[in-house]
Amino acid sequence: MRKKVTQMSLVDTYMDMAASLEHDKPLLFRRLDEHIDWDSIIPDRFYTAFHQRMGRPRKYPLLGFIKGLVLQRVFGYAQDSQLLNTLRHAREMRDFCGFHKVPDAAKLTRFKQDFLPHLAQVFDRLVELTEPICRAMDAELADSLIFDTTGIESYVTENNPKFMTRKLNQAKAIAKLDPSFNPYKGVYGLLPDHANASSAVKQQFINGHFCYAHKAGILTNGLGIVRHLALFDDHFKAAHPDMPLSQRSDNPDQDKEIGDATALLPVLRDFRIAHPSFSFSTFLGDAAFDSYRIYNALLGDFHFARAIIPLNPRNASSAPRASFNEHGIPLCPSDNSPLRYHGLCGGIHRSKRLKFVCPKSVRLGSTLRSRCPHPCSPSPYGRCVYVYPHSDLRRYPGILRNSPLWDSLCARRVAIERSIGSFKSVLCLDHRKTFNSITTKADLFLAGIVQLLCVCLAHSLHELTLARRVRKLIA
């Protein structure tokens, strides 16, 4: 009996070939195509801007650029050349991106610089999409907001170790002429304020070492998942003209052009404008935010129920606590006489406060000197008491300090440190060969986009425990 022969049509041949190609596609690419709705993530205005700029059909698709830049961070390629070399040798990766021809490095850079505002919109849309996912993962942690700043080091001469060695040798040469000069402290005064290649790359002291970097702020929830990003560039400063900028001092630990406390409220205002429907009950921060002005803003203007901020030792005094009369004026601990009001003081880094001084102090030139026969303070100008208006918000910031709940909430702040570390080491913010502010800002948003895409992918795969583990999720 003859075996029946079935003739295959062209359609059958095509379907078999397509199924074979789909089967051979790497698992990561299949997952991204099956579980990520790229059309819902990329706004229509992004497509419009992308095609209007040229006025003619583009050789490379918009989605191809975005997929390629996402894969660059997923695979840990800090340099564009690594991504382009992989694209040239991996047909599956080119097919996934939709590239018939591999673009050059200049086109990648131009894409990031030309469409930075649209990349920020993609990031904001992903923040909106991932908010309910975060609430489903852990409602309590997702209801907390954490803020911190970091520095993104740039590819400039000043970050070369030889540059620091040369400055130290100059300081040691000065020390030979002046034995009282400490070269290791004096080298700080020899460092320029900014890199020679770009005035936007500022000299900073980060994690125990000097470097030249762009300053950035990051907001995450208690899960460590990013909610907002800000690069403190000229655009950010122009949008917040009331934000004070510090002047250079002799202390590298405190010498920051834009300190953490200075940047917090502008970043929170921008976050509220971008996502007006979001609300969080708990704010977490370090002791740098221990300021009455910040407590008032967090618990009042931004409607946080509690602010978990450790007390800053610099804001406390070792002198005995003063008592007050019925008018709120502090009294001398020796004879209960009222102290003399000296005026209102306060600066960029310290809260506004009322200053009271010893009534027996007299002014000598530009300073005060105590004439009290039995001084209650070792200070040469006598006892000095600062009164902070609205001090109860600092003492009781919506939660009892040192309570078990306080300790458990305070421990969660480490989540933002882990997120920043992931942005730098895993998502390739470190070791980039650029000092351009626009490119750096685009890379910052792309790192945030990749982290949020992993949250979406983990949710679709029902593996929420891997939402913050990029390498584990793609393995």
Image (spheres, rainbow, N blue to C red):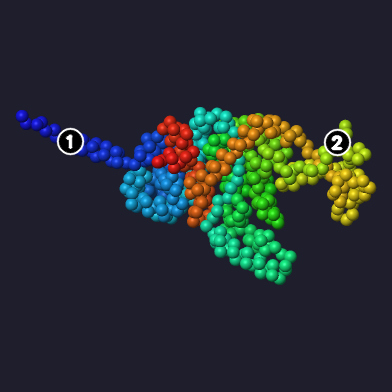
Residue 14 visible from this viewpoint: yes
The answer to which image quadrant residue 185 occupies is bottom right
Residue 304 seen in the figure: no
Label 1 residue SS: loop
Q: How many marks?
A: 2
Question: Label 2 amino acid?
Answer: Ser
Q: Quadrant of the C terminus?
A: top left
x and y, in percent, of residue 87 in the image: 36, 50
Across and down, in percent, residue 303 comes to 65, 31
Q: Earlier in the sequence, mark 2 or mark 1?
A: 1
Query: Does 356 sit left or right of 435 as displayed?
Result: right
> Which disc is residue 9 wearing?
1
Q: Residue at x 64, y 30 (%)?
A: 405
Query: Which of the pair 15/30 is nearer the observer?
Result: 30
Residue 306's disc number = none
Looking at the image, which residue is at 86% across and 38% down?
Answer: 330
In-front residue for pair 272/135: 135
Name the quadrant containing residue 332: top right
Label 2 to label 1: alpha-carbon separation: 97 Å
Q: Quadrant of the N terminus?
A: top left
Query: Which residue is the extreme one toward the right?
Result: 373
Residue for badge 2: 323
Does residue 204 lie above or below 217 as drawn?
below
Q: Residues within 10 Å of mark 1 (few under 14, many from 20)?
A: few
User: Which amino acid does the dot numbered 1 rest on?
Assistant: Ser
